[in-house]
Image: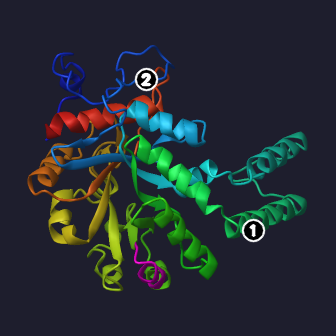
Amino acid sequence: MNKSRRRFLGVSAAALAGITVLPSLTSCAGAEPKAAAPADGKVNSNFAGVRMGCITYSFRGTPGGLENLLSYCKNAGVSNLELMGNDLEGCLGIPESPQQRLMAEARAAAEKAGQQIQGRIQLGPEAQAEMAKYQETVKAWRASMDWDKVAEVRKRFNDLGIDIHIVKTSPGANSSDEDLDYAFKLAKAMGAPAVTTELSLDTAKRVAPFAEKHDMILAFHNHMQYATDEWKDGPDPVLAISPNIMLNFDQGHYFGSTGKHPVDFIKKYGDRIFSIHMKDKTGPDAQEPNANQVWGQGQTPLEDLLHYIRDEKKPFYCDVELEYPVKPWSNAVKEVGTCINYARQILL
């Protein structure tokens, strides 16, 4: 059910000549992939009616900021984007968090004192006070958001042909009214019709009224919940709370944890799916179960899934979520581009 990666990577240059944006597959180790510039200067990752894209989580570990994100999307050939809230706020100039510095200082102090460190290191009272002060700074920054700057950032993405369909602000059951209003207002200002967060009945009850208030979609993302007793029968309890609730369906986590075909899930809940996270994994019965794999080397039925979405003309956004280990001679941007073009070969 999976297309051979060797066959994909061996496609001739002549066959690839029509690609709008093609990251180099033979770049030197560590080199930034270069994309062929389309005639209108815009990227396009829509193939045969299927809207391929990615979540900016895929670029984790790379330098942030607006110019970098635009470059990553352009070089990977991505025109549809699920934008992480922290990535967006980084583009907007959020004050830098002291957390990494404080954690490093606490670790160094513990090692100097000869203490054995197990798990996540705990911050001392002074460091906790500094973090609390930072949270107040962020709260004030958000309350005084320069919405003209948000519009400018959105335009920079749109000028490259990149549309934002989700801003992942992860609203939760304990979020304040101010934080919930801010989350939906920020996403709407970026042109995104949805925000997304993790699957939770309590979160659905708390946040759904704000989705309705702002006429937005609250899309729930799954990890391995559908393999648990609580969720084995599906997301019906959450979907029943509001018509503004939809699913940010992670087909890789679903298949890897349950072994069930994701197309069967889509046939049942297709009218309540907003977007899909795309990845390749092993199944639950593999020697290394539920493990992320290079696309084409796992067991996830990617070809079946993409053909179904194409043939049934489903309007889902299909976002690459890069989670397999990136080799030292490659980088996240190149791998996202390779996944996008792998999907293209399946769809065209």
Q: Residue at x 54, y 65 (%)?
A: 186
First in residue order: circle 2 vs circle 1: 2
In magenta segment, residue 266: no
Residue tagged by mark 2? Answer: 33
Q: What amino acid does circle 2 point to?
A: Pro
User: Where 179 falls versus 280 (above or below)?
Assistant: below
Q: Quadrant of residue 266?
A: bottom left
Tell me if 262 is positioned left or right of 198 in this view. left
Count of residue discs = 2
Is any part of residue 2 visible from this angle?
no
Q: Which mark is residue 35?
A: none
Residue at x-position 17% and y-position 70%? 268
190 shown above or below 27: below
Q: Element at badge 1?
A: helix
* Residue 140: mark: 1
Q: Position of residue 340 (x, y in %)?
A: 30, 37
Picture quadrant where residue 257 is located = bottom left
Q: Main secondary structure of the magenta part?
A: helix
Residue 291 place in picture, x, y as percent: 37, 44
Residue at image position (19%, 20%) is 11
Which of pointers 2 and 1 indicates the residue nearer the eye?
Answer: 1
Q: What's the magenta region?
A: 209-216
What amino acid does circle 1 point to? Ala
Q: Nearer the viewer, residue 3 or 307?
A: 307
Q: Position of residue 74 (x, y in %)?
A: 42, 34
Relative height, residue 147 to residue 200 (above, below)? above
Q: Quadrant of the N terminus?
A: top left
The residue carrying pointer 1 sits among few (fewer than 14), some (14 to 19) or many (20 or more) residues within 10 Å by Cα, namely few
Task: Pinpoint residue 344: horizontal percent, then vertical percent.
Answer: 21, 36
